Image (cartoon, rainbow, N blue to C red):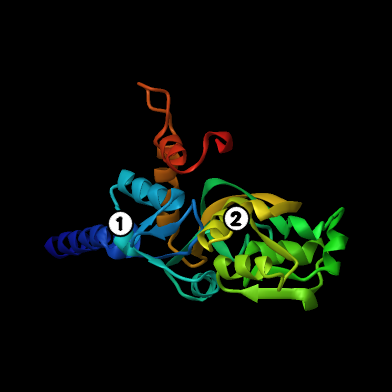
Amino acid sequence: MALNFSIKNICFLSLLLLWASPSVALDSLNYLTEEYPPYNYRENGQLKGISVDLLVAASAAMGSPVTKKDIRLRPWPRGYRSVLHTPNTVLFAMARTPQRETLFKWVGPIGETRIVVLAKKNQHIKINSGDDLANYSIGVILDDVGEQLVLEAGGDIEKIERATTAIALAKMLDFERIQLWAYEENVARWSIEKAGINSEKFEVVYVLHELALYYAFHRDTDDKLIEKLQKGLDKLKQNHPNNGKSLYDTILMKYLPKECL
């Protein structure tokens, strides 16, 4: 009997240690993001943005805090390949599309996004349907949702110009090395301004899709971690009883103009 009791205690303690192990701690994961303001970006050496602040707050709410020091900034193509092939990796913010649905596990939504096609106003380009895209050279970020949506809409793969940064594409569009640019609208305009170009020179000529942004996890990630962060994010979206606002709303208002809320 004493031996059986001892074995039971050892098993029980083992289960407790398993639960407390890094495998179920959110800060045990490898977090990657890119320059995609206002959702995630670096300013004066500090990571910031809607999805960065939400991740920090949601993980803290669940007693498993992830800090900004746990997040690494990477070009999107590199981050995308990492989350596809490297266990315990998270990439954000990623548009959740039917093509990507089974490739990852998801936590969100972080917020809504609009993927558009931009052109220089002085080119007077008119896009009436997706089929018209085949007539133009189009800049995209490699493995970005803009690339996928352009090809689905009718773009010609032979006329797709790929780059690794949004600023590079902003300059290419301004110098007329490409005729169109497919990207998230707010991020595109931020990147144009950061490149030292007046964003008023460009206009939206076609809307590819309106989507939601999520945290994307390698598909073998422990479901307990997915559930933990999702619960934390859901908590942030609950209204505070005193002022009727949620912490989620407060973070959005910090980065988005009133007309976008």
Any part of residue 95 in sight: no
x and y, in percent, of residue 258 in the image: 53, 34
Residue contact between numbered discs 2 and 1, judged by CB atoms under 8 Å: no
Q: Is residue 159 above or below residue 96?
A: below
Res. 67 mark: 1
Res. 198 mark: 2
Other residues around mark 1 within 10 Å, as few (<14) / some (14–19) / many (≥20): some
x and y, in percent, of residue 230 in the image: 45, 47
Which residue is at a point 62% across and 63% down the rendered structure image?
102
Any part of residue 224 in sight: yes
Quadrant of the drawing holding the C terminus? top right
Name which quarter of the figure residue 41 lies in.
Answer: bottom left
Which residue is at a point 59% across and 66% down the rendered structure image?
103
Q: Amino acid at mark 1?
A: Thr
Which residue is at a point 50% across and 70% down the rendered structure image?
83
Q: Amino acid at mark 2?
A: Asn
Dot 1 falls on a residue whose secondary structure is loop
Please state if 185 lies on the left or on the right of 176 as rendered.
Answer: left
x and y, in percent, of residue 142 in the image: 62, 72
Name which quarter of the figure residue 68 lies in.
Answer: bottom left
Other residues around mark 2 within 10 Å, as few (<14) / some (14–19) / many (≥20): few
Which residue is at a point 50% across and 54% down the rendered structure image?
37
Q: Residue 110 versus residue 49: which sits nearer the camera?
A: 49
Quadrant of the drawing holding the N terminus? bottom left
Dot 2 falls on a residue whose secondary structure is loop
Res. 192 mark: none
